[in-house]
Structure formats: C-alpha cells, structure tokens
Image (tube, rainbow, N blue to C red):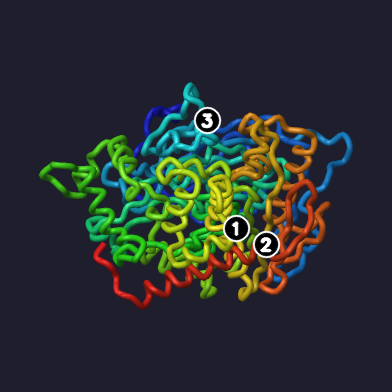
C-alpha cells in the first residue's frame, strides 16, 4: 500500500541505517554535543517529525477533552512520596485552546513477511521522503468475528484492511515543545492475542489530561505465536515462539528512542492494557527482554498467572509448544511433499488463519504464549511469586461482571445449564472439581449459568489481578488494586452490568461504544479515571484529586478501590472463592514439577 507522500515504496538499506533516527542518510551521524542536544529538545513539536526510519507527517487539530491541562511535573525521585499529587491543573482564564497532534501508521519494525514470517522482530526498514502518518496502517491478520455477539461488529460493518505488514504504531500528544517531558502511556490492545489493533482506541482523552499516548499493533494468533523446531534452529538464541511479545518489546524500544520528539519522557513510560493486553503487560513485567523499557505498569482485566505451556516440555494440561507447532505445520501443509519451514512461509496468510480456526488446539488462548527460554524464562506466575518481575509501581484491577458477555463463547461448544457448567469446571479446575459446587452452587440450570459466569470471572480476572497485586508486596514498589462496578448505559445494562472491556470506554473517549447513551455521570467518571490513570503515570501513585485515600495493596489489608456509583475503598475482595483457584493452580504447578510428563 502506498503510504509515503513523496515516494511510493520503502527502500531496503543496511541495518545500521535502519536505526538512524534522522532517516535515510547513508552516513553515520556524528554524536550531538550536550548543548546541541538540549537545543534540539527545546524545539517545537511540529506536524513533521524525524523518527527511526525517516520523517513522518501527522495531523494537527484542536485538543482538550474537558479543559486545557498543563503538562504534569517530571517524575519524582525513586522512593519519594507523591501521595495526593496531581498531574495537571486548570489553565488561567483566556489561555489558548490545546492543540492535539496525531501521528498514525508509523512503522516500528520491518514487515514480518517472507523469510521474516515468524522470525524475531527485525529493525524497521527506512523510507525515503515524508511518510504520510495521517491514517492508521492495516491491522494484523486476524479473524473478524470472535463468536461473541456482544463484541462482534454488525454483519454490514466495514472492516479495516488486514495485512501481515502491520507493525505500526500511533501517537497522540498535546505537547508544544520537545522538552516538556510528559508522562508516556503505551497501550497494549486486547483481543485474546488473536484479534484487535492499536487503532481501535483513541488517545485523545488521556492526551488531553497531559500524557503522550502510544498504541500499536503486534502479530496475532498463529502468525504471532508459533514455536517450531526449525524456527528454533535458525534462531541464534535457539528459541522460537512468542513473536507477538517480541513485537511489543520492539515497540517499547521505539518509544525509548523516539518519544522525546513528541514531548514525552523516555524515562517515565507506563505500559497499560486490557484483557490480553493486560496479560501482555504482565509478560513485559516478567520478561528480561523488556527490563528498563518502562517504569510503571497498569493491568486491566487480565494477567498471565495461570500455569503456562513450555516450548520443549509437555505439561499435564498442554503439549510442548514445539510439538504443537509441528502439528499445526502438518495441518497447514496437508499432503504436500515439502514439509519445510520455507514451504510453510510460502502459504498465504489466509490459509494460516483458516487452519488456526480449524481446531481449538490451534486457537485456544492458553496455548498461544509459552515459556520459550528467552522472552519468558519461567511462567509469569512463578516469576512474580519469586519476586523476579520488574520492580515498578503497579496498578491492576477488574470489573464486577467480566463473564456475563463472554460466557456465550463457551456455551457454543460446552452446552448450557448444569451440564455446561460441569464441563467447564472439570476442564478448567480438575484439581478441585469436588469443591466447586460448595462455592458456586449450580443447583438449577439458571443458577448454573450465574455460577458459571462468576467462576469464569474469578478464574480469569478476579484472582489473577489479586495475585498480581499480592506478588508486588516483597518488592520496593507499591501496587494498587481496583474493582470497576459501574454499569455503562447500554441497552442491555441489566444483562451485562460492568462487563469485560467496560473500562476502555471511560479511558479512550469512547462513551458511546456498544450503542451506549452516556450521561453527565458517565462523563464525570471518565474524567476521574483519566485523571487517575495519568496521575499514576506521572507520579507512580494514583492518589490525589477527588479520590478517597486509596491504600496500597498489602497481604494484610487486601485493599482495593471500587470505581462505581460511589467511589470508595474496600478490602478482601472475594477471597474465599479465589483461594480455591489459587490452591488448584498451586497443585497443578507442583504436579508438573515433580511428576512425569505425558507423551502428548
């Protein structure tokens, strides 16, 4: 697709040039003097910006969602108390309206096509001329509908263009100068690691409260998560899999190298995400490859704290990722004589996607990430339990009714009522099946459906977020836990309540999503949440503004903040039920550490 204004294609250049900040010159630039660097940082943020790979041209328009905000103060020194600090203040009367600058579809890595399909993320290929960055690039290859009517687009909806050449990012900023050092917020989108894109959400609201916001695409499904012996053999580090997570690391490296040109502070980067995006945040916090690339972490409704599969070792609950990769390759190639990785790389992306959709073995969310020995040297839960995660301020939470909209996905192939609930419980928590009814009481079909949504909510969201917060206690950095109970004003509010994904509407200028009709109360909650999230990004502490005092989480206080009709603090959220899940997963890890592996 033609994405340059002056040149119609990207030009291949040596790797050294691929990391040159100022574009297409073939000469290695001389190091800038400190005085020259300070002078450059005082420059204005303009429509055209030089970034890794070349020059981009974005759009300039009016910003300021609620009111013009001055930029947040710079990050405090490590260990200093910022309780009650606010990242923004109202302007003097008569001040000029904010100017919002947007830059979309910026390549941050080489296109993962041809020999780079399934390869580790490669440096961006430079372009000549000025790249048109006014519109997002294509989204990564994915299924267009996930089978949950509440989330799927209407049948007649116009769907975005898809391509394997999709590793691009987007930036929103109201900074006027490059030396403003605003907090940077890097959003990792959700979608079960199989769908979604960075362009789904707008950074306008958070930018209006003082942040520089970045969103990006990463490889998805079996194009983004495939381990295979031949991939392992061609990798100098002797690993494969988790390509999508490698893309995320590369995006964070781009932010480190370029975000100052948009008025952001590369020394104050917050990663945040929802669902699979929050899972990804926990992976980044656990991964040695991402260490030092971010300084705060926010996880919304998801975390990688269940026992994970391994690249080369079978588990009682999953075959090794390389073994699964061989099965997938065989299914893709069918009866072809050539079974090589080269042949697999020649198969059209549509066929890769179709094969992935043909079996739960190939598309189940839990079978995509793996302990590969590089991005992840141990499963996320074990890394956090040992205190080996990145020691950064952390804010995590979930919603009250996560499972209400999602349960339709499981009913499709497990059935409904008591029988469906029993199938789900037996598959997900076989270690404690005999005890589940005492906690979730599925006495009738109707009660079983309610119990099923509660069990799924606790299993996938409530417990992982509490485990995440609890795992931070031995470290120096504090953690804060929230619980979102507000019901967005959708037509089905009584059915879905505080559904999975509801928090995104209140952070990304999307109050009308899901056909909602927002009220002044919704707009006020959005303002409060945006201020809180940006304050945390700026200072490492969410407290301040009009919030009640929100205690940092400890094992003793089990404190959380409820974001609902009333914003208030609470403690010991659903502990008896999630203790059952904790015990089941501990038993699963113990069995796989001590027992023999099956020949899966």
Report the residue that reaches farthest toward the left.
337
Tell me if residue 237 can be seen: yes
Q: Marks 3/1: CA distance?
A: 37 Å
Q: Nearer the viewer, residue 168 or 14?
A: 168
Instruction: Answer whether labels 2 and 3 touch (C-beta < 8 Å).
Output: no
Instruction: Answer whether labels 2 and 1 touch (C-beta < 8 Å).
Output: yes
User: Dot 1 corresponds to which residue?
Assistant: 462
Q: Secondary structure at mark 2?
A: loop
**Residue depicted at x 50% and y 63%:** 305
Q: Secondary structure at mark 3?
A: loop
- Up the image or down, 5 lies above or below 169; here it is above
Looking at the picture, how far across and down is residue 163, in whole percent?
A: 38, 35
- Lower sequence index among marks 3 and 1: 3
Q: Marks 2/3: CA distance?
A: 43 Å
- Lower sequence index among marks 2 and 3: 3
Q: Nearer the viewer, residue 33 or 597?
A: 597
Looking at the picture, how far across and down is residue 365, in whole percent?
A: 42, 51
Number of numbered discs overlaid on the protein picture:
3
User: Dot 2 corresponds to which residue?
Assistant: 573
Q: Marks 2/1: CA distance?
A: 8 Å
Instruction: Answer whether labels 3 and 1 touch (C-beta < 8 Å).
Output: no
């Amino acid at each position: 697709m033609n994405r340059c204004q002056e040149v119609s294609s990207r030009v291949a250049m040596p790797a050294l040039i691929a990391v040159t900040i100022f574009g297409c010159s073939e000469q290695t630039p001389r190091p800038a003097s400190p005085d020259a660097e300070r002078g450059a940082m005082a420059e204005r943020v303009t429509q055209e910006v030089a970034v890794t790979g070349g020059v981009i041209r974005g759009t300039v328009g009016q910003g300021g969602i609620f009111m013009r905000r001055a930029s947040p103060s710079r990050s405090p020194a490590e260990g200093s108390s910022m309780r009650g600090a606010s990242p923004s203040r109202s302007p003097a009367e008569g001040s000029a309206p904010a100017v919002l600058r947007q830059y979309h579809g910026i390549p941050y890595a080489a296109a993962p096509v041809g020999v780079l399909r399934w390869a580790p993320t490669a440096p961006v290929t430079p372009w000549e001329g000025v790249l048109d960055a006014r519109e997002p690039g294509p989204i990564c290859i994915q299924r267009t509908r996930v089978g949950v009517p509440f989330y799927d687009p209407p049948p007649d909806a116009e769907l975005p263009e898809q391509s394997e050449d999709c590793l691009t990012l987007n930036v929103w900023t109201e900074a006027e100068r490059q030396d403003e050092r605003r907090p940077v917020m890097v959003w990792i989108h959700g979608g079960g690691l199989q769908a979604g894109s960075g362009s789904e959400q707008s950074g306008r609201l958070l930018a209006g409260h003082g942040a520089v916001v970045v969103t990006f695409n990463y490889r998805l499904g079996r194009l983004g998560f495939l381990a295979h012996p031949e991939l392992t053999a061609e990798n100098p580090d002797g690993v494969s899999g988790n390509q999508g997570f490698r893309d995320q690391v590369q995006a964070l490296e781009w932010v480190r190298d370029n975000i100052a040109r948009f008025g952001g502070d590369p020394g104050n980067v917050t990663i945040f995400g929802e669902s699979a995006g929050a899972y990804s945040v926990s992976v980044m916090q656990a991964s040695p490859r991402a260490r030092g690339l971010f300084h705060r972490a926010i996880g919304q409704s998801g975390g990688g704290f269940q026992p994970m599969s391994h690249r080369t070792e079978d588990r009682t609950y999953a075959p090794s990722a390389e073994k699964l990769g061989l099965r997938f390759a065989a299914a893709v190639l069918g009866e072809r004589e050539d079974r090589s990785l080269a042949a697999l790389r020649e198969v059209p992306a549509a066929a890769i996607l179709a094969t992935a959709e043909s079996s739960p073995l190939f598309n189940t969310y839990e079978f995509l990430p793996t302990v590969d020995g590089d991005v992840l040297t141990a499963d996320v839960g074990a890394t956090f339990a040992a205190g080996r995660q990145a020691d950064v301020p952390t804010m995590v939470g979930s919603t009250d009714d996560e499972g209400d909209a999602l349960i339709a996905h499981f009913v499709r192939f497990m059935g409904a009522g008591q029988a469906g609930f029993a199938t789900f419980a037996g598959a997900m928590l076989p270690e404690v099946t005999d005890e589940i009814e005492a906690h979730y009481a599925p006495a009738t079909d109707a009660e079983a459906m309610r119990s099923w949504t509660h069990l799924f909510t606790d299993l996938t969201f409530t417990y992982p977020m509490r485990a995440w917060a609890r795992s931070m206690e031995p470290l120096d950095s504090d953690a804060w836990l929230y619980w979102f109970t507000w019901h967005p004003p959708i037509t089905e509010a009584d059915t879905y309540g505080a559904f999975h994904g509801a928090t995104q509407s209140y952070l990304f200028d999307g109050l009308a999503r899901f056909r909602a009709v927002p009220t002044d109360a919704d707009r006020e909650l959005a303002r409060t949440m945006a201020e809180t999230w940006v304050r945390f990004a700026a200072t490492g502490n969410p407290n301040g503004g009009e919030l009640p005092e929100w205690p940092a989480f400890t094992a003793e206080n089990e404190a959380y903040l409820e974001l609902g009709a009333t914003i208030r603090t609470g403690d010991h959220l659903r502990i008896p039920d999630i203790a059952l899940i904790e015990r089941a997963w501990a038993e699963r890890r113990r069995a796989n550490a001590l027992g023999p592996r099956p020949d899966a």
